[in-house]
Image (cartoon, helix red, strand yellow):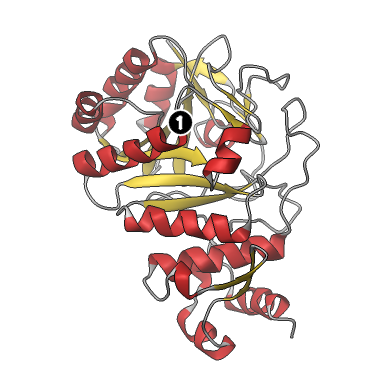
């Protein structure tokens, strides 16, 4: 049986040779299927109608290896966690169970990103070491979802799945993936963030990444400064410092968090701009080239760098 590994994971495991600016702290894998995903998300390399390299997800290459070889390499690795990504195809559930059974003796916690399955499947996954479930809602509003997510699952199907994951795994154990820059307003994006936390789930925030061969290959990525503001919004909502109803918007654009600059500087720390995901996840350079400032920092920014970012945001 084959499985895909992110390029960085493959390098750390000694399956590939290469240099890295930041090593992954989680081992990232993806189910292997010779065809494409049954869904047709406009931004996704794996989409049914995508012309992009099937070895990619976002801008990361995911070469395939034998599962037994990967498991053997993992035995001597120092990863804190395994993250298994999936695409939709026939017999996906059976493949996921086989992979989880192979990983289980390693004793590593597993995060699983998957489209809706029944509660029995969730419990089966849980017995095999899964402690977090990633839910790719991706689009921050039903309006945008219906435009970019040609999926077997509706907007409300995905939100129901979030609730079911929380029922099985507990509060904070569902990570909802939201992509900023798909055509939503900033107000819609932060409203979706608030809905996630009101559902007792958490948010993993991504920046839209245009990839050649996808439907949205010519769409521009989001402005980094606006993305930083969304990260601050997530931080304030997650930490219950403020709710979206307290933020101010004009024509859908965020203009005020409802806090003074001095109050913001007191409550924010460097983690606001770091990768937001399961414990041990740093997801290096998933959205950007290593030569550019990352949307999500894989390691904690230095305090001086953090202050420069804040100064840039607040026009000092």
Give me the residue at 20% from left, 42% from top.
167
Identify the secondary structure beneath mark 1: loop
Find the residue positioned furthest to the right.
218
Choose between 204 and 245: the one closer to the eye: 245
Give the number of callouts.
1
Q: Is residue 154 left or right of residue 180?
A: left
Badge 1 crowding class, 10 Å Cα cut-off, few under 14, some 14 to 19, many 20 or more, is some
Residue at x 58% of width, y 87% of height: 261
| Figure check: 140 above or below 50 | below
Residue 298 visible somewhere in the drawing: no
Which is nearer the eye, 309 or 79?
Answer: 309
- Residue 134: % across, % down: 40, 39
User: In x, y percent, where is residue 166?
Assistant: 25, 44
Horizontal side, residue 273 vs residue 311: left or right: left
Q: Is residue 202 above or below residue 67?
A: below
Q: Quadrant of residue 18?
A: top right
In the rendered view of the protein, which quadrant contains the N terminus?
A: top left
Please give left or right for residue 155 compared with residue 149 in the image. left
Q: Quadrant of residue 100?
A: top left
Q: Nearer the viewer, residue 64 or 48?
A: 48
The spot of residue 118 in percent (x, y) is 26, 25
Residue in the foreground of this view, choosing between 304 and 203: 203
Q: Residue at x 24, y 34 (%)?
A: 129
The residue under the point 56% across, 55% down is: 188
In this orientation, does residue 227 appear? Answer: yes
* Residue linked to disc 1: 154
Q: Quadrant of the C terminus?
A: bottom right
């Amino acid at each position: 049986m084959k499985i895909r590994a992110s390029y960085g994971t493959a390098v750390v495991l000694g399956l590939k040779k290469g240099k890295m600016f930041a090593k992954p702290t989680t081992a990232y894998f993806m189910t292997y299927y010779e065809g494409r995903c049954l869904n047709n998300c406009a931004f996704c390399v794996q989409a049914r109608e995508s012309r992009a390299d099937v070895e990619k997800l976002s801008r990361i290459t995911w070469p395939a290896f034998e599962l037994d070889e990967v498991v053997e390499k993992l035995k001597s690795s120092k990863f804190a966690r395994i993250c298994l990504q999936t695409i939709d195809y026939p017999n996906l559930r059976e493949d996921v169970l086989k992979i989880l059974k192979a990983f289980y003796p390693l004793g590593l916690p597993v995060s699983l990103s998957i489209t809706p399955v029944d509660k029995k499947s969730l419990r089966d996954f849980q017995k095999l070491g899964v402690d977090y479930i990633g839910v790719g809602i991706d689009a921050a509003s039903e309006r945008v979802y219906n435009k970019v997510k040609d999926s077997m699952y509706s907007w409300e199907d995905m939100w129901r799945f979030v609730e079911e994951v929380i029922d099985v795994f507990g509060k904070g154990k569902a990570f909802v993936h939201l992509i900023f820059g798909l055509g939503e307003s900033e107000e819609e994006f932060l409203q979706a963030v608030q809905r996630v936390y009101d559902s007792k789930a958490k948010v993993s925030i991504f920046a839209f990444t245009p990839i050649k061969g996808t439907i949205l290959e010519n769409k521009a990525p989001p402005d980094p400064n606006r993305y930083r503001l969304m990260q601050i919004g997530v931080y304030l909502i997650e930490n219950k410092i403020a709710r979206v109803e307290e933020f101010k918007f004009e024509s859908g654009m965020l203009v005020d968090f409802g806090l003074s600059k001095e109050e913001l500087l007191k409550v924010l720390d460097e983690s606001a701009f770091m990768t937001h995901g399961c414990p041990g996840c740093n997801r290096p350079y998933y959205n950007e080239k290593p030569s550019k400032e990352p949307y999500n920092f894989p390691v904690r920014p230095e305090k001086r760098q953090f202050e420069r970012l804040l100064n840039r945001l607040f026009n000092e």
